[in-house]
């Protein structure tokens, strides 16, 4: 029988299932988070994303100790941009487009320094890294097959940005039958109102996309999973 631990979540308690839960860390990339990077060059305040790093590092450590599968994602494109639709390429500030030179290499291009994950949250050996061309982590990737093969049914969703890649991935996961909990202090937006409303939308209408809880609720539950496994 699968061991479960209850997380005090909204809109109702969430059953954290041992062996069936994965932690998804979305797009904690230098291009989005580093001062002087792509995100900041668009006029955004990267500190709004950087507040996520300490709680997410603590959650990652607890998830690793509890033996959860950990999946990291990176948004980005091939150097020849053949996987980037014109509709995506041509939007945004004309001087700062995907593939243009940026402070940390070509913007959102695989293999560039800025495309990779920040040092504080670097993937550990054996953790899966999904390179995704879209906002959603399921689109044009092996994520669903990877999770299915591992018997994963529950997702703890974290990363940036709340209303873009976190929301798109959460919605895609719902349509594929996953039970999603968005960890509120481990997701970030450049826009405070989008952060607030983005989280409201997940848990509205009885949890239309899933559950919301913070690390103060999730980490003790992970620790309890670790303890009961011993
Ligand atoms: C954006 C993302 N905001 N990871 N990407 O373009 O949310």
Image (cartoon, grey):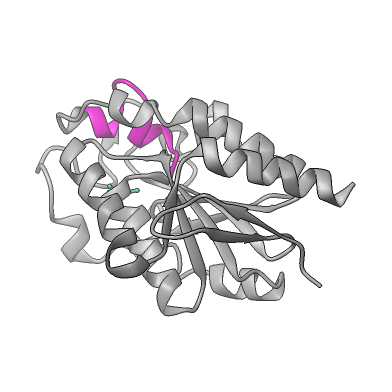
Start-end of magenta stretch? 27-40
Up the image or down, 39 lies above or below 64; here it is: above
Query: Which of the 4 quarters of the picture holds residue 184?
Result: top left
Quadrant assignment, res 132? bottom left
Whole-percent x, y for residue 65 in the image:
76, 40
At which x and y percent is residue 21? 64, 61
Q: Is residue 79 left or right of residue 145?
A: left
Q: Nearer the viewer, residue 125 or 103?
A: 125
Q: Quick one: 176 or 93, which is closer to the camera? A: 176
Which residue occupies 32% across, 20% down?
Answer: 35
Q: Does residue 105 show up?
A: no
Image coords of residue 173 (percent x, y):
45, 70
State left or right for residue 117 relative to residue 206: right
Image position, residue 149 (x, y; %): 70, 75
Q: Does 167 lie within the magenta span?
A: no
Magenta span has 39?
yes
83 vs 60, left or right, is left
């Amino acid at each position: 029988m699968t061991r479960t631990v209850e997380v005090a979540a909204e809109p109702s308690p969430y059953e954290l299932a041992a062996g069936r839960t994965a932690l998804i860390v979305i797009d904690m990339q230098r291009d989005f988070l580093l001062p002087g990077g792509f995100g900041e060059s668009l006029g955004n305040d990267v500190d709004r994303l950087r507040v996520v790093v300490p709680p997410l590092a603590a959650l990652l450590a607890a998830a690793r100790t509890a033996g959860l599968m950990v999946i990291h994602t990176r948004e980005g494109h091939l150097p020849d941009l053949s996987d980037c639709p014109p509709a995506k390429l041509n939007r945004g500030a004309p001087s700062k487009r995907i593939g243009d030179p940026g402070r940390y290499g070509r913007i959102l291009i695989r293999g560039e320094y800025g495309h990779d994950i920040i040092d504080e949250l670097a993937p550990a050996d054996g953790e899966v890294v999904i390179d995704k061309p879209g906002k959603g982590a399921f689109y044009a990737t092996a994520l669903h097959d990877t999770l299915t093969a591992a018997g994963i049914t529950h997702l703890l969703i974290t990363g940036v940005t709340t209303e873009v890649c976190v929301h798109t991935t959460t919605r895609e996961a719902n349509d594929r039958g996953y039970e999603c909990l968005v960890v509120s202090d481990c997701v970030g937006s450049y826009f405070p109102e989008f952060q607030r409303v983005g989280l409201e939308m997940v848990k509205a209408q009885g949890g239309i996309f899933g559950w919301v809880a913070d690390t103060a609720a999730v980490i003790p539950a992970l620790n309890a999973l670790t303890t009961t496994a011993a």
